[in-house]
Image (tube, rainbow, N blue to C red):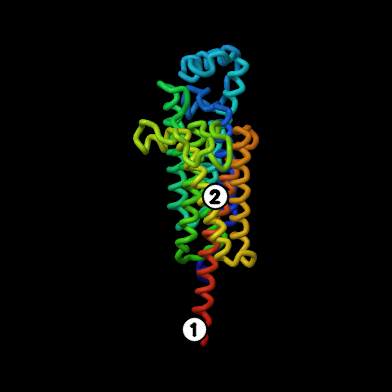
Amino acid sequence: MSSGQAPPCRAVTVWLIFMAGAVAVMVSIGGITRLTESGLSMVEWRPLVGWLPPLSEAEWQRVFALYRETPEFRQVNFAIGLDSFRAIFWWEYVHRLWGRLLGVFFILPLAWFWLRSRIDRALWPRLLLLLALGALQGLIGWWMVQSGLADRPDVSATRLAIHLGMALLIFSLLVWTVLDRLHPHRGRRALSAWLLLGLIGITVLSGALVAGNDGGLIYNSIPLMGGEFVPADYRSERVWIADALENPVAAQLHHRLLAMATLLAAIVAWLRAGSFRAGTPDHVLLATVLLQVALGVAVLLAAVPLSLAALHQFGAVLLLTAALLRTHTIATDENTESGNTATISAIQ
């Protein structure tokens, strides 16, 4: 940091850290909502007046009547009563309520910091981008829900992956902004670190396709799938891209392969860094990858129990955080080292 530049406001940094944590909680709630198949229990989208849940028996009967008109009720949950409906309704309600609160947590402090002139000019583009992405995420969420209210009894796995991808993009931007404020070095990022980060992101999104297609409920064996490396029903009569997005067998196989590629890439990165002499971010990343793979295997073998599956989905957020930290730290260290070398050369 140049001597004439004021240090970043600590309160703003703390706020951004809080926002990153709040988004991580949102991803976890969304994962549980999917695992409990609660996402289609609220068929109305009322972004401004939908803060309160049903407060009377008549209102509960009204929203339950709306749900009984959906394909999910008619084809899957036709036997449930009002009490069972309440159980799935509450998860989706909490999910949407937390999304609204995220907007409050972001907009009100943003306005306060703006009025107090606490936000440096260089930060404004990222904050406005985050605001726009947050609004877009609300629209994507409703677009996803609509896919399960017309002709099918569940949401589109592709739209689910897009919804998760946007959440992780917002989370990553928040984490990267915090790291920039804590370690404000500038310089080129290592290509290998970016590639590993990208591989982890693709692997996480492939997991969303597994969840969206209920792909974890089939072929619950390791390392083969039904005794074969590539099962016979990996391909269907659909075109390849549709198979990759909508075939649960293809979704599971792709996720397995990507997970193994991520594990091997993390091990290679750790060895290239000097294995036991590697820096803390390299150790953290490898440990997080190993934990995530172990959780994934346990979830598959146990046929997707709620507790393990929720841990595995939250582990994806931790893994992404570890990859962001490593990528940023490598760039910081390289930039610092080059800066020190230039300073020594100038003195000599």
**Spatial distance from mark 2 to mark 1, Cα to Cα?**
39 Å
Q: Nearer the viewer, residue 232 or 317?
A: 232
SS category of the residue bearing label 1: helix
Q: Along the horizontal axis of the image, is 307 left or right of 151?
A: right
Q: 133 above or below 42?
A: below
Q: 117 above or below 137?
A: below
Kindly give the residue lying farthest to the front in the view shown.
227
Q: Nearer the viewer, residue 129 or 270?
A: 270
Picture residue at 56% right of the left edge, 13% below the top: 79
Question: Residue 97: horizontal and vertical position, in percent?
Answer: 56, 31
SS category of the residue bearing label 2: helix
Q: Earlier in the sequence, mark 2 or mark 1?
A: 2
Task: From the image, tell me which residue sits under label 2.
Answer: 320
Question: Residue 54: horizontal and vertical position, in percent?
Answer: 58, 19
Question: Residue 190: horizontal and vertical position, in percent?
Answer: 47, 63
Picture residue at 47% right of the left edge, 35% below the top: 249
Q: Along the horizontal axis of the image, is 287 left or right of 338?
A: right
Task: From the image, tell me which residue sits under label 1.
Answer: 346
Tell me how many marks there are: 2
